[in-house]
Image: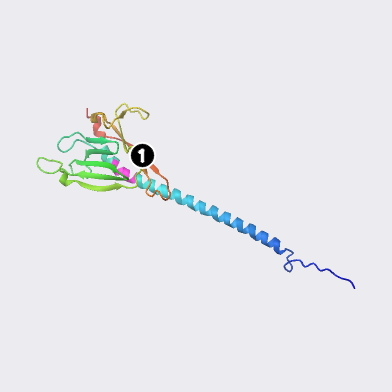
Amino acid sequence: MKRYSSIHKNTFSGNGYTVIEILVVMAIIGVLGIIISKFQRDVFSFNRYFDNSLSVGDSAQKLLRPMTAEIRSASPSSHGAYPIDAVADNSFSFYSDIDNDGLKDWVKYSLSGTTISKETIKPSGNPLTYSTANKVTKTFMTGVRNITDGIPVFTYYDSTYTGGSGGVVSPSTGSLSSIRLIGVKIRLDPDPNQSPNTIEVSTQVAIRNLKVQQ
């Protein structure tokens, strides 16, 4: 009697592929799927990061515009005081007609913690005086990292400043009358636990009316 040994191949009818080969292909496809999915997720994450960065930076720039306009138009107060009232690394006060009513408001921008506040006083009385009872305080910007990062919000320059180094007026020892240009630099991180990372916006403002102040 002849004995036949039969070898059973694990095949699917008509396709010629073994189960093992199909499993290997499926495993490869699965790995590729994971890689592609992760890549897409990273792309979306980067897009979201850049979108958020642009949004934060654009918002900060929009907020700086009214501030710089007010500083640029600083002029003697309604009772004749010098246009610049006081200077510090993280605060700056001055006089400016911010609402175009003919009266020079006292304006102060100051950083405390991670919040920049804007304080204003409208002069009143006869003769005009700046009473603290009329002070209005509003939140100007939040999520500011300047104190944490050791970067002053305000830097002051005299007429010798040419855009490079030098010409810096010390807030503690410099003369107010020597200041001709104010640099503003703000580092923002609205949510340290989420992207984007810190965004920095900066500008420089020349006070028009100080050109004739000696």
- Over which residues does the magenta segment extend? 61-67
Image quadrant holding the N terminus, namely bottom right
Q: Is residue 100 visible?
A: no
Question: Seen in the image, is 77 located left or right of residue 14?
Answer: left
Q: Please provide percent x and percent y for residue 69.
A: 28, 41
Q: Report the residue that reaches farthest toward the right.
A: 1
Q: Please provide percent x and percent y for residue 210.
A: 24, 32
Relative height, residue 159 to residue 71 (above, below) = above
Which residue shows up at 40% across the image and 44% down it? 198
Query: Label 1 amino acid?
Result: Ser
Relative height, residue 29 to residue 101 (above, below) = below
Quadrant for residue 169, please give it.
top left
Quadrant for residue 129, please give it.
top left
Question: Seen in the image, is 101 located left or right of residue 12?
Answer: left
Q: Is residue 43 visible?
A: yes
Q: Please provide percent x and percent y for residue 45.
A: 48, 52
Mark 1, residues whose alpha carbon is within 10 Å: few (<14), some, or many (≥20)?
some
Residue under circle 1? 202
Relative height, residue 12 to residue 66 (above, below) = below
Q: Please provide percent x and percent y for residue 185.
A: 34, 39
Magenta run includes residue 121: no
